[in-house]
């Protein structure tokens, strides 16, 4: 599996505890059994203990060593509800509403991180992205120096010259219509994440225009964001606004923007909004034969990640390693 050796080595030295919100799901059980066999991650499976054990036995997965927590029987439940109430009482919730909220596994799992019982969380095998991410936004919160939580995908395919071609794309999953300043922050976070995956980032702020060839509000947004990002991160090659062909094709780049140090060779892509980003990474995945890892959430105080509901056990396993290694 691509580039996971370094992450696994890191986890072997410092194993992390990861919560899986959908403990009864067969894909989670398969991934958990594989993780338990390697012992660099400590899984917590949320759900009814009998159901989880029976589901694992029926499917032939050995989950011995996994901690199973049933929110309905959790001994620190009242403390958890109280803590959530304190966090959210300024939103007008009652203690009773806090109890009703934290019994749900997406909230319960996120509260386990807040209470120091776990380092990170992976959910979304059955929950929507919004339902997986919302508790993290409300409970874990944005890092002190960040203004938004965002996300990126890492895309990987074998390269024609050997090794792997690795790209980063953002924000394809969280911010629906990021502002110029949010795009600058998304760029900084994505660059950091891309480096962890061995990318030497060359960042393109994407648009339907290359350096003024087209006009419009969104063109201005991407150009201004690229200018601000270059100013903020002077050591990173950043350019924009660029069309996708100018960003990746040296021939097109020579024609459209010959002086750019990024155009033709971009490997880190900042999209104008979630429509473009989500469609873009899926085209790369479905038609470009890239493996897609993500969305990897950026800018949270602890690592919480979202699975696609169509995920398989291998994707759960890889995302668990990524989630824990970034913790
Ligand atoms: C992420 C998302 C769920 C947040 O939506 P929401 O829950 O309706 O957001 P709200 O405006 O009600 O905000 C909820 C809380 O999260 C915070 N928040 C919302 N977006 C945030 C962001 N990008 N970064 C940091 N905090 C954020 C709000 O400040 C608010 O905090 P508070 O309750 O403590 O005041 C929403 O932006 C979304 O649906 N994004 C698209 C997800 C998606 O469908 N992706 C495609 C599939 S991969």
Image: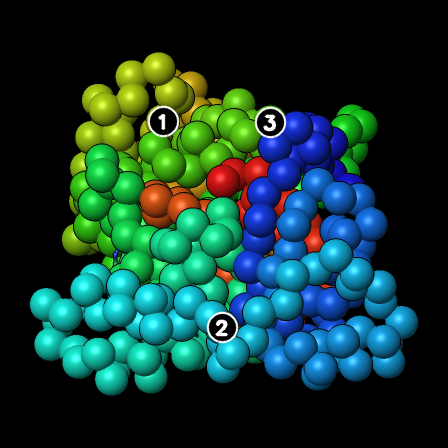
The dot on residue 198 is 3
Compute the Cα span from label 2 to label 3: 41 Å
Corner quadrant of residue 238: top left
Q: Nearer the viewer, residue 64 or 246?
A: 64
- The relative height of residue 209 versus residue 287 in the rendered view (above or below) is above
User: 10 Å neighbourhood of mark 3: few (<14), some, or many (≥20)?
Assistant: few
User: 10 Å neighbourhood of mark 2: few (<14), some, or many (≥20)?
Assistant: few
- Secondary element at image label 1: strand
User: 10 Å neighbourhood of mark 1: few (<14), some, or many (≥20)?
Assistant: many
In the displayed structure image, the side of residue 301 where residue 284 appears, left or right: right
- The relative height of residue 262 versus residue 77 in the rendered view (above or below) is above
- The relative height of residue 127 versus residue 236 in the rendered view (above or below) is below
The reply to whether residue 30 is in sight is yes
Q: Which residue is mark 1?
A: 238
Q: Nearer the viewer, residue 297 or 159?
A: 297
In the displayed structure image, the side of residue 153 where residue 42 appears, left or right: right
- Front of the two marks 3 and 1: 3
Corner quadrant of residue 273: bottom left
Q: Position of residue 292 (x, y in %)?
A: 62, 52
Label 2 near ligand 1 (CB < 8 Å): no
- Front of the two marks 1 and 2: 2
Q: Position of residue 233 (x, y in %)?
A: 29, 22
Compute the Cα span from label 1 to label 2: 49 Å
Residue farthest to the top, as pictured: 235
Q: Earlier in the sequence, mark 2 or mark 3?
A: 2
Q: Nearer the viewer, residue 258 or 221?
A: 221
């Amino acid at each position: 599996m691509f580039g996971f050796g370094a992450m696994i080595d890191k986890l072997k030295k410092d194993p992390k505890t990861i919560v899986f919100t959908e403990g009864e799901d067969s894909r989670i059980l398969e991934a958990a059994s594989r993780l338990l066999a390697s012992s660099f991650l400590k899984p917590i499976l949320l759900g009814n203990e009998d159901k989880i054990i029976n589901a694992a036995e029926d499917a032939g997965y050995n989950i011995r060593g996994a901690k199973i927590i049933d929110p309905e029987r959790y001994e620190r439940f009242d403390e958890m509800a109280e803590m959530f109430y304190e966090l959210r009482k300024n939103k007008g919730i009652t203690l009773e509403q806090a109890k009703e909220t934290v019994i749900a596994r997406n909230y319960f799992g996120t509260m386990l991180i807040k209470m120091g019982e776990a380092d990170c969380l992976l959910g979304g095998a059955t929950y929507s992205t919004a339902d997986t991410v919302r508790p993290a936004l409300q409970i874990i919160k944005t890092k002190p120096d960040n203004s938004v939580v965002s996300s990126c995908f890492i895309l990987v395919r074998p390269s024609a010259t050997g090794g792997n071609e690795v790209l980063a794309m953002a924000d394809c999953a969280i911010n629906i219509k990021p502002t110029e300043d949010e795009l600058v922050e998304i760029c900084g976070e994505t660059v950091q994440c891309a480096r962890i995956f061995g990318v030497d980032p060359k960042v393109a702020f994407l648009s339907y225009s290359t350096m003024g060839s087209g006009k419009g509000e969104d063109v201005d947004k991407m150009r201004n964001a690229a200018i601000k990002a270059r100013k903020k991160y002077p050591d990173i090659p950043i350019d924009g606004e660029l069309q996708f062909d100018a960003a990746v094709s040296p021939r097109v780049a020579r024609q459209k923007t010959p002086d750019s140090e990024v155009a033709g060779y971009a490997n880190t892509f900042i999209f104008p909004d979630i429509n473009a980003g989500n469609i873009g990474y899926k085209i790369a995945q479905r038609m470009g034969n890239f493996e897609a890892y993500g969305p990897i959430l950026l800018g949270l105080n602890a690592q919480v990640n979202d699975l696609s509901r169509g995920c398989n056990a291998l994707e759960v396993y890889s995302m668990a390693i990524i989630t824990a290694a970034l913790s």
